[in-house]
Each structure stands twice: as C-alpha cells, then as structure tokens.
C-alpha cells in the first residue's frame, strides 16, 4: 500500500493532516514536511462511495482457502447474565428471559445491571479469587468451559501451541477505584497501596490469568477495542491461527465493568444510562421508550482451530469464520458514523464474496441509546436494502451491554441457529421506533427461518471502532 | 497483645491470605513455605495486613523474621505488646 490516502479523496478539512501516501495534493497548501492544509468545508470520503478499498482484497471466503487457512469454532464457553453455558443462554434467548437485575454500586447508588451467576470456584481456588480480578475469573470460567465443550485432550495437548486472545473494553478501573477507595481510609498514604495493583491492572491481566490457570505457555494478550472487543478478540485468534502462531486459539471477550462505578457514572453524565421500574424491561434497543444502556458483565471464549486440525481430531464444528472486517469512523469520540458502519459490513461481505441477501441473521450491536440505535439501523437499511430475507435481532435487550464480551456473547447466542433454524428475538420492543423499523426485525418471539447459512455479527465501540464478523454454517 | 494473641492474629491474617489452607496443623517452628503454598506476594500481604491493622511498619531487612509462626511472634512481640487486639 503506497499510503493511507490511497482509495480516498481529500475533500477537505481545515485541520492539518499528514499526507502519508501519493494522494493528490492539488489545491492543498504545504505546511511543512508531509503536512498540507486541506480546503475548508470538505472532509475525507472514500472516492468510490462504496467503502471498499481500491487495493486488491484478500478473500476470506472459505471456498477460496485451504483447510489450514479455514478457521472453525469447535468450542464455546460463556457466562452471561441469563446463562452460564451456551445451552442455558440459548434457551433464555428463545424464551425471552432477561438477565438484568437491580444493582447497587458505591457513589452511584441504586441502578440496574446484567449480573452473572457462574460459580468462580469451579475452576479457581479462593486464593486465586483473592489475588486476581473479576475479569480474570470471567475469562477463566469461560475458557475452561470452552475447552471442555471442545473436548480437547488437555493433558496431551501442547500448551505452547495455544494462544489466548481476549477482547476488553477497559481493564483496571475496578481495581484502581477499589484501591483509591481503601486508601482514603489511610489518609491517602500510598504505603497502604496494594502490591497486587499492578498485576491486577496490567492490560493483559484477564488473558494472563487464563494462561496461568490453564498452564498455557503460548502467546496471551488482550485486545483493547472498546465495545467491539468481543469480535476483535475472535478476529485476532483467527489471524494468529492463519499465521501459524498457535494451533488452538482461545478467543473472545470479557467484561467486569459492572464493578466500576465510573462506567455507570459516566453513562449517567452522558444521559445514556438506562432506567426502568422493571429491570427486565430496561434494556430496550429499537423501542421508542429506550433511554440508554444497561451495563452488564460477562465473558465468552471460543475455541478456534484450523479446519484441518479440527477434522483430524473429530471436533464438533459450530460454524466457520466466513469473513471479518474492522474499520474506524475517525469522526467522533462517542457518536457513531453509519456510513463507516455500512462500509465495515460491506467490506466483510466483499471479503466473504457474499451478497447481503445471503446473510440470514444480523446480530445487531444496538445498545438502547436514542441516536446509536437509529444510526445502526440507517447503516443496516443501506447495506441490506435489497434483502427481504435477512432477519435482524439484538441480544442486549436480554442481558444489557456486556462491553468487551458483547460481540462474542452475541455471536455465541446466535450460533445454535445453524442447527435449530431459529432467529432469537429482540425483547422489550413494545413500541418500535419508526427510525429503527427494519421490516425483518425479529421482535418478542423467535422466528423460524427456512435456512440459516450465514450470521453477521455487528459490534461497534467508542472512538469509532466498527467490527463485523460473518460466520457460516459448516459444510465441506 | 500477649504472644498468644499475636499468634492468633497471625493465623487470622494467614487465613485471609491463604483461604484454601488448613492452618490447624501448622507447625509453629517450621517455615511457612514448607507447609503452605505462599509466595513473595503473600509475605508482602502479611506485611501489609500488619500495617493496615496495627500500623506496624516492618522494614524490608526484617522480612526474614517472618519465616515461621514462632519467629514471627518473637519478632512482633516487642512491637505489639502495647497494642490491644480488636
């Protein structure tokens, strides 16, 4: 690639932009080495209007790949506010069971949250819990469950060939808040600050705790990607498998965010924290009465393998990664950009060599905010305008927003559709917002589909990160 | 605090730091590390708990005195004799 400007026309900005590539400099004032002033009133826009790069794309389509480049999901481990394994979670999604409950946290007081009920002592000692973090526990539970589900021979497997890649929206806020709270009792004398603070708050902590717990000596790290992190973790795992850096990837996302008052307080200050007298009705994407986000905790870890390895060990295959894409709005810290969201979906579709009408289910990102939901629907209408077969649903309406785990959990909850042919609904849509009125939005009750071959999973986040994962029903 | 009370205090701290361990059979004269799964971070926890509970500052060069239950009690006795166990 000759530079970042390739495939993009400079149409304007009064901001100084560094010109990294060979894009046209006509009409731009040179400000210094590599910097030009771009005519006012204009902004960066893809020159071709469809958001696809002008460079040749590497296809992700399974039929274009060899078996050692095809990536399949062979295990799922999760904890969600309404289920502690995939079967429970799926049953709750089909039965309309919410996992949102009353919750109270220091300084903020009474609020609502999606709270997980898994038993952390199933895979950890009391000392592990004391020393580690909630995000670590969530990851350890989900990873162990995933390994069990995949039926991996854990004693025989080479632990140096396993990689752990967990998406996180944030990490360290919980421990930092706790330490400062306790330090206040010692008049802020930092000699009382815990020596556990650093290992608990390093950004790789949740993945590192998983590796410690399971004796994994391959690579481990987290992927910080705001609320797109669940997809980003999955994508990272797939990429590392394709590169040959590992033979098994434990990939997905985790969130402990309900234990930090800051996230509640910040959403509240932003006017984006949901409230409803009935907690189970508080998370209501696409409904006219939606009033914000319900913060949730959770985790989901997928066992990813190259198809060749999965077939060799006779693994059960939940689905095959058909494509993915990540892009960036570059327009705002918080506000989404439907044009970029649409571009991200189109890029994933193009890499999969798919037309929009081939997608059977779109798992939407919508969080229950006024603007965010409407803008995602705008992007969805644009991309799926020609498809009346694609159904849309939303998992956050059941569990709230599980932040770094959201993308992975929302994909996991839809995977059983390959087998049962059901699109789980979006609950709490009592009065559909006309701006969100997607004609094939599945609300209140599951919908039986004639077939489910492809699921597209949207996951977007602050600072304008967009991610899309497409999973295909496995077939040779 | 009497030596017996200091001993109880140390055992209470250990029960928090090593909640999975059975402390009832702890030999007071044998090093903790030979009997319990304690690492350097755990010993720092003992130091921190004594600081938090009793405002006792233990300099790093004295950490070696915290090797066993008996050596810890012996080391702490002159520092805690005027304290009252809460």
Image (spheres, rainbow, N blue to C red):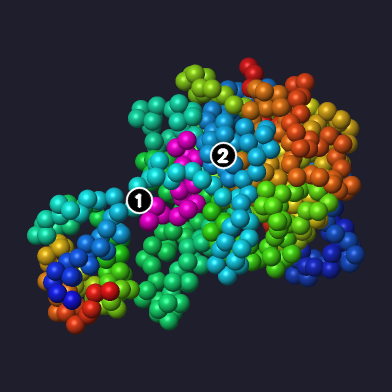
Whole-Å distance between the Cαs marked 1 and 2? Answer: 23 Å
Residue A7 in view: no
| Residue A132 horizontal side relative to residue A11, left or right | left
Q: Residue at x 38, y 30 (%)?
A: A154
Image quarter of residue B57: bottom left
Kindly identify which numbered label has been placed on residue A83: 2
Viewport quadrant of the N terminus of chain A: top right
Q: Residue at x 71, y 24 (%)?
A: A421
| Residue B11 horizontal side relative to residue A202, left or right | left
Q: Please name whichever residue, A377 or B23, is drawn nearer the observer in this view of the structure.
A: B23
Magenta: main secondary structure: helix
| Residue A203 horizontal side relative to residue B62, left or right | right
- Find the magenta span and give its range: A129-145
Q: Position of residue A355 (x, y in %)?
A: 81, 29
Image quarter of residue A299: top right
Residue at the farthest front position: A277
Q: Please name whichever residue, A249 or A98, is drawn nearer the observer in this view of the structure.
A: A98
Q: Is residue A28 above or below residue A282?
A: below
């Amino acid at each position: 690639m000759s530079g970042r400007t390739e495939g993009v026309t400079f149409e304007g900005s009064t901001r100084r932009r560094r010109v990294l590539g060979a894009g046209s400099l006509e009409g731009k004032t040179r400000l210094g080495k590599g910097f030009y002033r771009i005519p006012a009133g204009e902004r960066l826009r893809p020159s071709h209007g469809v958001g696809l790069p002008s460079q040749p794309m590497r296809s992700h389509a399974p039929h274009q790949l060899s078996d050692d480049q095809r990536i399949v999901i062979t295990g799922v481990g999760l904890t969600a506010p309404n289920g502690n394994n995939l079967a429970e979670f799926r049953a709750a999604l089909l039965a309309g069971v919410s996992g949102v409950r009353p919750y109270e946290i220091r300084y903020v007081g009474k609020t609502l949250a999606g709270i997980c009920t898994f038993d952390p002592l199933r895979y950890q000692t009391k000392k592990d819990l004391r020393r580690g973090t909630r995000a670590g526990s969530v990851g350890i539970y989900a990873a162990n469950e995933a390994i069990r589900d995949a039926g991996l021979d854990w004693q025989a497997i080479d632990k140096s060939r396993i990689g752990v890649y967990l998406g996180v929206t944030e990490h360290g806020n919980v421990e930092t808040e706790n330490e400062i709270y306790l330090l206040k009792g010692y008049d802020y004398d930092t000699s009382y600050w815990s020596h556990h603070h650093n290992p608990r708050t390093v950004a790789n902590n949740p993945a590192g705790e998983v590796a410690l717990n399971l004796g994994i000596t391959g690579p481990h790290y987290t992927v910080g990607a705001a609320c797109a992190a669940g997809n980003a973790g999955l994508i990272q795992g797939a990429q590392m498998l394709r590169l040959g850096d590992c033979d098994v990837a434990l990939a997905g996302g985790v969130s402990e965010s309900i234990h930090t008052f800051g996230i509640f307080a910040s959403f509240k200050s932003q006017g984006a924290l949901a409230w409803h007298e009935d907690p189970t009705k508080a998370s209501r994407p696409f409904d006219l009465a939606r009033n914000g986000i319900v913060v949730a905790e959770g985790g989901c870890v997928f066992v990813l393998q190259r198809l060749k390895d999965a077939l060799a060990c006779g693994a059960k295959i939940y689905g095959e990664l058909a494509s993915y894409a990540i892009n960036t709005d570059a327009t705002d810290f918080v506000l989404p950009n439907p044009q970029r969201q649409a571009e991200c979906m189109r890029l994933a579709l193009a890499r999969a060599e798919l037309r929009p009408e081939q997608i059977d289910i779109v798992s939407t990102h919508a969080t229950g905010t006024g603007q965010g939901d409407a803008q995602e629907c705008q992007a969805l209408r644009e991309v799926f305008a020609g498809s009346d077969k694609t159904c849309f649903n939303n998992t956050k309406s059941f569990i709230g927003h599980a932040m770094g785990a959201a993308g992975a959990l929302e994909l996991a909850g839809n995977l059983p559709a390959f087998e049962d042919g059901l699109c789980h609904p979006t609950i709490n849509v009592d009065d559909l917002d006309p701006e969100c009125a997607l004609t094939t939005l599945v609300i209140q009750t599951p919908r039986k589909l004639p077939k489910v071959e492809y699921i597209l999973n949207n996951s977007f986040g602050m600072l304008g990160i967009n991610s899309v994962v497409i999973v295909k029903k496995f077939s040779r | 605090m009497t030596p017996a009370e200091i001993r109880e205090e140390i055992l209470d701290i250990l029960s928090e730091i090593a909640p999975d361990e059975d402390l009832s059979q702890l030999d007071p004269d044998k090093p903790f590390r030979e009997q319990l799964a304690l690492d350097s971070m755990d010993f720092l926890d003992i130091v921190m708990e004594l600081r938090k509970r009793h405002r006792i500052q233990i300099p790093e060069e004295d950490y070696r005195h915290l090797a066993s239950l008996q050596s810890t009690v012996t080391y702490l006795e002159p520092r805690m004799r005027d304290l009252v166990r809460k």
